[in-house]
Image (spheres, helix red, strand yellow):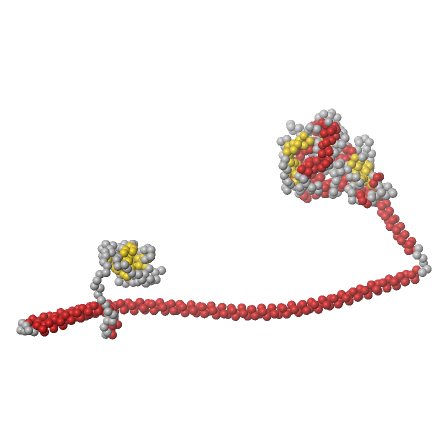
């Protein structure tokens, strides 16, 4: 059941973006454990970036940042070649393969992880 | 801290690691890289040399006996070709030279045109400059003339003022002479009256004398009576005449020219003021009369319709008004009062224009209307 | 203060002998190319040291692949260029079976898009490196020191690493390793624990609430409370469990200021 769910998730993701299979062999195990684990993230635009109607999202905690970047790009209907940068704490850009959970553990405030996104490098 | 065991362990492990991983390979790999590079270089050189060798072999394989000849002919061929190309080049250059010459001519023509244009422009510039100069001069002249005219104007104004002063003096003199004249006339009338009295007395005496002895001489008496009446009439006429007599007439010795009559019939009679009426004046333009009274008021009357009609009461004086006058246009009224002040009112809106004590005190005798009231 | 230069030197000196081999499937010449041997610093990143390798092997691949991005593989697994070389080695090469030189396969074809990221140029590596540095500073000093640094200092750090210049690098890195203000330790320890399925990060303070300094053991307990026995490897060695965390962070961090701990 859980495997099936994960499969659909991956399919969904792959239609628009390439998810980072950082955990190829541990997938089944992992998903069964953290399937329901979701964290709240808050997406805020910076600079010239368009505003998202919905700011608060729940994301599975084992999703990589790259997945969120692709998600935002799809949501904002950006071209494939357009760039999008994400920033934590308005200070550093997390690695695309960084897992949301790690950032949540270290940088969340009041139960939410605030991510700023923009179309040009901001806090380079 | 330096002596801590964990630190020593770490240092030892790191040193061990470096010995095992780094130092034993470092020289080997450096050596290898050197060898690798030199091998590559040698390989490249080898390749290069073999290519050169091949080339030489091809060249060498062409034979040796007729080498000189073929080379010569080749050279000739080369030279011919070179010559050909050079002649072509020469032709090309000639052509270009011709084009250039043409261009030079064209440019020269253009240059000349420009020169011409320049010279015409210079001429026009010179013309306009001279025109500017003449206009400047004209302006100078005109300003000079203007100055002169101004000067002249000033002189004329001064002259005019002097004349005005002289005129005033003369007028004053005239008035004095007129007064004298009036006194003289009065005296004349007195004399004439005395004359008439004497004659009457004489007549009476004569009549009294004559009636006693001669009652028949009544006719003579009638003649005397007639003569007497005539004389009386003449005297009355003479009295009337005195008003129109000018000083000139007296000097020249002529009798009065204008016929004057004493007003006999009252046209309108009205009580204008509470108290005495001190001054009356006709408006020079309308049938309007201005009066000044002891009740400190100046009143305007319209008498054109045969009746009096009070047009306005001009107030402001603090004492009885002693004299009034209009200005020449009839729009201003001047009133002099016993409070040592003269005031000016406008007829149209009946407002006090100028009042209060003037800086100089005018006696009523001196008073005359000054038109320049600024 | 990171003042134990002996340790820092030893850490910096660590280099690995690597034998690069072009994957046989991609060779188009008749002759198999020679393997390319190189000493690579453990603290560096592969894109910074493989220019010569790429040049060497380009001659042997077909022309239409010349412009392709080169990627590396070990034991059938593509290697992430954004991990320091030392981390890759410690993590990928099994403890006891390791043999040196390290044999790495070079590829030009079939870039594994889903597993590793492309790096279009060295600037991208640099910006990744700087991002890590800033993140570490956020953990250590709330990001104050890195933010106040000038572009010149960033360049010096980067060039020091790129050109293997210990003094140049530490002249600037020293400031990042200082403790700010009154405090005698960092706010949190920047570290990553590498596991089979990626790495884990958490907030760990260098001292306990009572002010007692924490050791590596404390960190492992906080991270893996369920495990009784955890093997840690960093810089090719297993540090003693009683090593203080603050000291470890100051002396055993990689140039990106993170402690990269491989967990077995």
Question: In the orientation shown, which residue stands out farthest toward the left?
Answer: B213
Horizontal relation, residue A36 to residue B198: left or right: right
Quarter-of-image position of residue C57: top right
**Which of these two is toward me, B269 or B155?**
B269
Q: Position of residue A29 (x, y in %)?
A: 74, 28
Q: Position of residue B75 (x, y in %)?
A: 88, 62
Quarter-of-image position of residue A36: top right
Q: Position of residue A70 (x, y in %)?
A: 70, 37
Horizontal relation, residue B49 to residue C79: left or right: right
Q: Position of residue C157 (x, y in %)?
A: 71, 41
Rendered position, B200 above or below B41: below
Image quadrant holding the N terminus of chain A, namely top right
- Is residue B56 in view from this perspective? yes
Q: Residue at x 18, y 71 (%)?
A: B234
Q: Residue at x 85, y 46 (%)?
A: B40
Image quadrant holding the C terminus of chain A, namely top right
Rendered position, B187 above or below B24: below
Q: Residue at x 28, y 57 (%)?
A: B300
- Is residue C232 in view from this perspective? no
**Which of these two is toward me, C9 or B207?**
B207
**Which of these two is toward me, A91 or C244?**
A91
Quarter-of-image position of residue C98: top right
Rendered position, C192 above or below B37: above
- Count up the numbered dots: 0
Horizontal relation, residue A23 to residue B198: left or right: right
Horizontal relation, residue A66 to residue B301: left or right: right
């Amino acid at each position: 059941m859980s495997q099936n769910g994960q499969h659909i998730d991956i399919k969904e993701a792959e239609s628009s973006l390439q998810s980072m299979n950082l955990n190829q062999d541990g997938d089944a195990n992992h998903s069964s454990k953290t399937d329901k684990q979701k964290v709240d993230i808050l997406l805020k635009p910076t600079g010239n970036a368009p505003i998202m109607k919905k700011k608060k999202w729940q994301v599975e905690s084992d999703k990589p940042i790259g997945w969120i970047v692709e998600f935002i790009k799809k949501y904002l209907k950006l071209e494939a070649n357009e760039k999008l940068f994400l920033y934590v704490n308005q200070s550093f850009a997390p690695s695309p393969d960084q897992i949301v959970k790690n950032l949540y553990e270290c940088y969340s405030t009041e139960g939410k992880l605030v991510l700023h996104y923009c179309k040009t490098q901001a806090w380079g | 801290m330096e002596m801590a065991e964990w630190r020593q362990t770490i240092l030892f492990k790191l040193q061990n690691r470096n010995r095992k991983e780094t130092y034993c390979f470092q020289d080997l790999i450096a050596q290898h890289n050197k060898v690798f590079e030199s091998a590559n270089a040698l390989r490249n050189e080898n390749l290069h040399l073999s290519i050169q060798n091949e080339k030489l072999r091809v060249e060498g394989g062409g034979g040796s006996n007729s080498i000189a000849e073929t080379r010569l002919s080749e050279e000739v061929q080369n030279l011919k070709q070179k010559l050909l190309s050079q002649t072509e080049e020469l032709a090309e250059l000639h052509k270009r030279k011709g084009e250039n010459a043409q261009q030079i001519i064209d440019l020269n023509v253009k240059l000349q045109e420009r020169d011409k244009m320049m010279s015409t422009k210079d001429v026009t510039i010179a013309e306009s400059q001279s025109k500017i100069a003449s206009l400047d001069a004209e302006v100078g002249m005109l300003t000079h003339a203007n100055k002169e005219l101004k000067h002249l104007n000033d002189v004329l104004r001064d002259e005019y003022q002097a004349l005005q002063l002289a005129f005033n003096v003369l007028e004053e003199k005239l008035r004095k002479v007129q007064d004298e004249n009036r006194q003289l006339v009065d005296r004349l009338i007195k004399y004439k009256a005395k004359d008439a009295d004497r004659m009457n007395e004489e007549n009476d005496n004569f009549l009294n004398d004559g009636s006693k002895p001669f009652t028949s001489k009544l006719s003579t008496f009638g003649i005397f009576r007639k003569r007497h009446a005539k004389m009386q009439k003449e005297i009355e006429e003479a009295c009337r005449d005195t008003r129109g007599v000018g000083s000139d007439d007296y000097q020249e010795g002529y009798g009065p020219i204008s016929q004057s009559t004493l007003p006999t019939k009252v046209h309108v009679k009205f009580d204008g003021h509470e108290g005495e009426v001190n001054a009356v004046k006709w408006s020079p333009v309308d049938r309007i009369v201005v009066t000044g009274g002891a009740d400190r008021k100046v009143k305007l009357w319209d008498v054109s319709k045969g009746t009096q009609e009070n047009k306005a009461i001009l107030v402001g004086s603090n004492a009885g008004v002693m004299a009034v006058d209009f200005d020449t246009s009839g729009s201003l009224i001047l009133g002099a009062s016993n409070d040592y002040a003269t005031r000016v009112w406008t007829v149209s809106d009946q407002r006090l224009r100028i009042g209060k004590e003037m800086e100089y005190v005018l006696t009523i005798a001196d008073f005359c209307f000054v038109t320049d009231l600024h | 203060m990171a003042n134990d230069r002996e340790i820092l030197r030893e850490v910096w000196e660590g280099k690995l002998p690597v034998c690069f081999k072009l994957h046989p499937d991609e060779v188009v010449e008749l002759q198999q190319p020679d393997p390319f041997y190189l000493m690579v610093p453990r603290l560096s990143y592969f894109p910074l040291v493989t220019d010569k390798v790429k040049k060497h092997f380009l001659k042997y691949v077909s022309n239409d692949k010349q412009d392709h991005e080169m990627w590396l593989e070990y034991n059938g697994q593509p290697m992430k260029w954004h991990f320091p070389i030392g981390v890759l080695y410690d993590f990928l090469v099994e403890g006891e079976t390791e043999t040196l030189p390290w044999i790495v396969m070079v590829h030009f074809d079939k870039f594994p898009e889903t597993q590793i990221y492309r790096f279009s140029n060295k600037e991208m590596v640099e910006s990744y490196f700087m991002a890590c540095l800033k993140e570490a500073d956020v953990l250590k000093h709330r990001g104050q020191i890195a933010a106040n640094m000038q572009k010149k200092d960033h360049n010096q750090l980067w060039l020091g690493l790129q050109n293997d210049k210990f003094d140049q690098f530490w002249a600037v890195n020293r400031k990042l390793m200082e403790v700010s203000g009154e405090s005698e330790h960092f706010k949190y320890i920047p570290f990553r624990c590498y596991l089979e399925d990626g790495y884990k990060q958490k907030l760990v303070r260098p001292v306990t609430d009572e002010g007692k300094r924490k050791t590596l053991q404390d960190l492992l307990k906080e991270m893996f409370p369920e495990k009784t026995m955890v093997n840690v490897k960093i810089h090719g060695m297993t540090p003693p469990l009683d090593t203080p965390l603050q000291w470890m962070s100051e002396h055993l961090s990689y140039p990106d200021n993170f402690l990269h701990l491989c967990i077995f």
